[in-house]
Image (cartoon, rainbow, N blue to C red):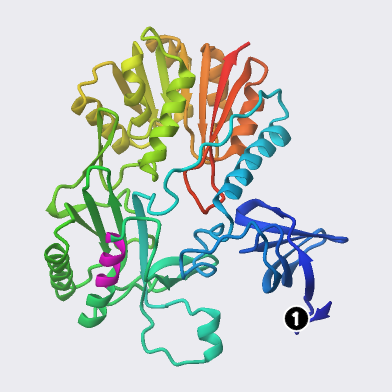
Amino acid sequence: MTKNKKQLPLIEKVEITAVAAEGKSIARLDDGVVFVPYVVPGDVVDLQVKKKKSNYMEAVCVKIHKYSDLRATPFCHHFGVCGGCKWQCLKYEEQLRAKQQQVYDNLTRIGKIELPEFMPILGSRKTKEYRNKLEFGFSNKRWLTEEEVRQDVNYDVKDAVGFHITGAYDKILDIEDCGLMDNLQNRIRNEIRRYALEKGLVFYDLRENRGLLRSMMMRNSNTGEFMLLIQFRIETEQEREQAMQFLEHLSITFPEVTSLLYVDNHKANDTFADQKVHCYKGTDYIYETMEDLKFKVGPKSFYQTNTEQAYELYSIARSFAALTGKELVYDLYTGTGTIANFVAKQARQVIGIEYVPEAIEDAKVNSEINGISNTLFYAGDMKDVLNSDFISEHGRPDVIITDPPRAGMHQSVIDVMLMAAPERIVYVSCNPATQARDLQALDAEYKVAAVQPVDMFPHTQHVENVVLLKKR
């Protein structure tokens, strides 16, 4: 072991032993553990420590002496810098094994409740081009890779369109090729960069909150439709003219885009939920299909990002609900009503609750266009809407389906669920850690009857999990 200039150690020829949280792996030493990205169990490596705490260290791999049999060849040449798909170097079957273990560890260590045998994780049929939505940012401060910095080259082009770099909020890694979505997004993004540089369009400066080109969002669907939304910050009539010429160029160059939209956003951040969306060409929505249902997806709509796996996820939730046509179902955190409408044919009535008013309007539209008449939707904060008065008015649910955000459910929501006392609860979660906490709070009245992990996001550490709870 030697020291670098910052007095942080270089650890030589250490074996990586396991997968850890946040897409990292770990090496175990006598004085603690080391967390390392972009390595896999079985690798023998040299590690340069970047951060040292009392009981753990964070490091980067600087040399690989032995490659693990669990290694896979990354398919993206941005791998290791982008940070979006940290597990590309790990064989997919090992990714699934790690995610299954992640769910098990969270539910046993945090939940500390009686559990049945877990069902094997359901892997994704597609491990590339599986996303239906991607977002890219523009920046006049392009992120330089370590190799570019070492070469000490004076780069004339400082503009970039791509992904934000973790820990450097104003820097963008220029992306040439992303394999997570249909290749049309690569052609569009690269043409946008070419056109913008040729025409001298100003890329956004996040620190100064100025610049014409801010961000872009792309969505595709299993109906073959494609949505492109560009966010501008338009200050002058000249910039407005530039923006309109830019959109016209895109509409001519990419006739595949059926929904071409734009936002003029002057806020300090790129969120546009509170901004007016303008339709330049085509419709202001696209459709997704699931079985015999159509779902209208707008620029502000939430829809599961992996369309094919969303069907599998919702099918599991519907199966766990075991509906016979007689049940009153509450669908909590209903979003645009996808689950509610998906299970409606098997229920007497489905009532969906969601915080975002626009999403509830989408949910109502989705019921209407599918001829579904046994759904009701309400907008508002879950802990405020779901109370004893609400249940008195609408009736006690036979089944509750809940699909909360990563933070899980508020204790008051759990309290009302316990008071409502449905026969079954189906808990869909994108965060098994907070799910485990909530299961513990429900454990006095409900027993976990089934656990089904689902992989929605290959090459990342994220995992969905569906749990069936039955009244004791």
Q: Quadrant of residue 50?
A: bottom right
User: Magenta stretch mostly in which secondary structure?
Assistant: helix
Q: Position of residue 417 (x, y in %)?
A: 53, 19
Number of marks in picture: 1
In magenta stretch: residue 187: yes
Magenta residues?
Answer: 184-192
The answer to whether 391 is drawn above or below residue 62 in the figure is: above
In magenta stretch: residue 2: no
> Which secondary structure lies at badge 1?
loop
Viewed as shown, does residue 59 lie left or right of 314? right
Q: Position of residue 326 (x, y in %)?
A: 38, 7
Given residues 63 and 112, the one toward you in this image is 63
Amino acid under label 1?
Lys
Which residue carries the number 1 mark?
6
Few, some or many C-alpha atoms within 10 Å of disc 1 (few <14, some 14-19, many ≥20)?
A: few
Can you say which quadrant of the picture contains the C terminus? top right
| Residue at (46, 43) in percent of width and height | 124
Viewed as shown, does residue 300 lie left or right of 285? right
For residue 344, say whether it is visible.
yes
Viewed as shown, does residue 140 lie left or right of 426? left
Q: Position of residue 378 (x, y in %)?
A: 34, 26
Can you say which quadrant of the picture contains the N terminus? bottom right
The answer to whether 85 is drawn above or below residue 445 in the figure is: below
| Residue at (33, 72) in percent of width and height | 210
